[in-house]
Image (cartoon, rainbow, N blue to C red):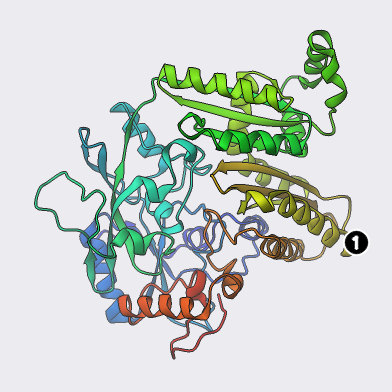
Amino acid sequence: GDESRISLRQADRARHGTGHTQEDMYDLRTGLIRFRLPDAVVWPENEGEVQALVSLASQNDWCLIPFGGGTNVTHSTHCPHKEIDPRQMISVDMKLMRRVIWVNEEDGVAYVEAGITGLELIRHMEKLGFTIGHEPDSYEFSTLGGWIATKASGMKQNKYGNIEDIVREVNVVGAKGLMSHKHKMEMTSVGRSSAGVDMKSLMLGSEGCFGIIVSAVIKIWPLAESRSHESVLLPNFGAGLRYVKGLSKMRSLKPASVRLLDNEQFRLGQALRASPSRFQSFRNLVSKNIGYYIGNFSERSVVCATITFEGTSEEVKMQKRSVRELASMHGGILAGSTVGKAGYDLTFAIAYLRDFALNYNILGESFETFVPWSKLTRVIEATKRKIYSEHKRRALPGAPFVCSRVTQLYDDGVCVYFYFCMNICGVGEPSDIFAEIERSARQEILDNGGSLSHHHGLGKLRSAFVRQIYSQGHVDSIIAVKEALDPINVFGARNGMFSIITKDGNQTVGS
């Protein structure tokens, strides 16, 4: 074979044995990697090579851990500790399997290899006049296979749905061979089917523990005729929540993306502007034209909803009118498309800002959850309080920076992101302390009605919470499915509820 597609180099192993959590970044930056690294990295080029690799792993008692873009924030690509699994660990990097095999424009579907990045896939489809509709924050580097394995969600979920709505079929190389649909005709998809449990259902959220996703059939849409942005400033977070809840009820008129930045995150975005903040200009505008509003707006309370429209010219026109009318009902002021686009783009910049801040001894991380509308205010307030109290209890230097953002909108609730940064000057083992505070915040989210994850998955980082969200019968049943599909645990990444499996059939939490 091609030896250039097998690596034992420390740098390759370190990159493939880590992801993008703050622990990963801190360890890589300090050179003190505390995690077990894979013993080798392999880059297969096609489905046949993946099958051969799985066969070799079965014969030689290796453990295979699939690797996509390496953007996971759950430790899902970490190798299990040697005490738990002493086998040789092989990271299977899928980036060479990135072909668009075929596109059926009439049916609106495409057959794509799983190693393709979001950026590559978006650019390929745009040249053909289509969009995939899926645009997660990490799309530059994350892959189709990774989206499926983590059950991902994108920023334009309101219009195109989550990954489970976009993917039509999934092809997987498992311990017993290729698992896929059979087709009588070429370049077709089964579409919706009531023919029992399919691979898509099994693989969504499987996090590399059932097999290696090699390809998928996905839905595609013609490029939108009209695309634009808008932003709405509202007096406070309560008014902002009522406003975005109103937008969530708009059904077909709901914009492609709606994001509500709390006051802290909005002011952070303004501080990052190359030119001075436009808030004073906004106050002057309000004072001049609608002076009676000025008492409702304060630089320390104002929030911003950033909105992205996609659709036909008529659809976008109707959406803009509804957005404007609803803003007026909730005491909001339109702030224009420039602020709207900047707010949308800020999402992509935050990961880079986190890594940049580490140069100045600021450690930061984001974490997400789904929260029902009825528990939204409670979860946000309680989680922020918890972070502040845990920071104070440890007598850490300075004050933490904590903010939140409401993103994907649903009829029954929303996805909420929390952001937490702290000064680590003079702090011993800062990454561990940060992780302790984050775990406390996650527990607070669960205790107040939020979910364990909306779209990042569980990995090993959140595996200790599994028993709080699933019954023992559920855990036992899913583990039984895993043991039937992969009896010798070739795919032993041990993510999510699979972190509690041991070789002898007992269950214990481990990573």
**Residue 12 horizontal side relative to residue 361, left or right:** left
Query: Where does the image place residue 224, in percent across and percent down from the top left?
Result: 39, 24
Query: Where does the image place residue 126, in percent across and percent down from the top left?
Result: 34, 29
Q: Nearer the viewer, residue 122 or 15?
A: 122
**Residue 270 horizontal side relative to residue 122, left or right:** right
**Residue 409 horizontal side relative to residue 502, left or right:** right
Query: Where does the image place residue 396, in percent across and percent down from the top left?
Result: 87, 59
Examine the rendered structure and indicate whether residue 298 appears above or below residue 136.
above
Which residue sits at x=34%, y=67%?
Answer: 211
Residue 264 seen from this side: yes
- How would you rate the neighbour count of disc 1 (Cα within 10 Å): few for under 14, some for 14-19, many for 20 or more? few
Viewport quadrant of the C terminus: bottom right
Residue 362 seen from this side: no
**Residue 367 horizontal side relative to residue 40, left or right:** right
Examine the rendered structure and indicate whether residue 243 appears above or below residue 400.
above
Viewport quadrant of the N terminus: bottom left
Instruction: Give the amino acid type for the residue marked by disc 1 in the picture.
Output: Ala
Q: Which of 323 and 15 is in front in this view?
A: 323
Which residue sits at x=72%, y=60%?
Answer: 441
Q: Name the residue under label 1.
A: 395
How many discs mark residues in the rendered view? 1
Circle 1 — which element?
loop
Query: Where does the image place residue 24, in percent across and percent down from the top left?
Result: 61, 59
Q: Of all residues shown, which one is farthest toward the bottom?
A: 504
Query: In the figure, residue 348 lies in which quadrant?
Result: top right
Q: Nearer the viewer, residue 294 or 41?
A: 294
Q: Which of 415 and 207 is in front in this view?
A: 415
Which residue sits at x=64%, y=42%?
Answer: 406
Q: Of all residues shown, which one is farthest toward the top?
A: 288
Q: Of all residues shown, which one is farthest toward the left?
A: 184
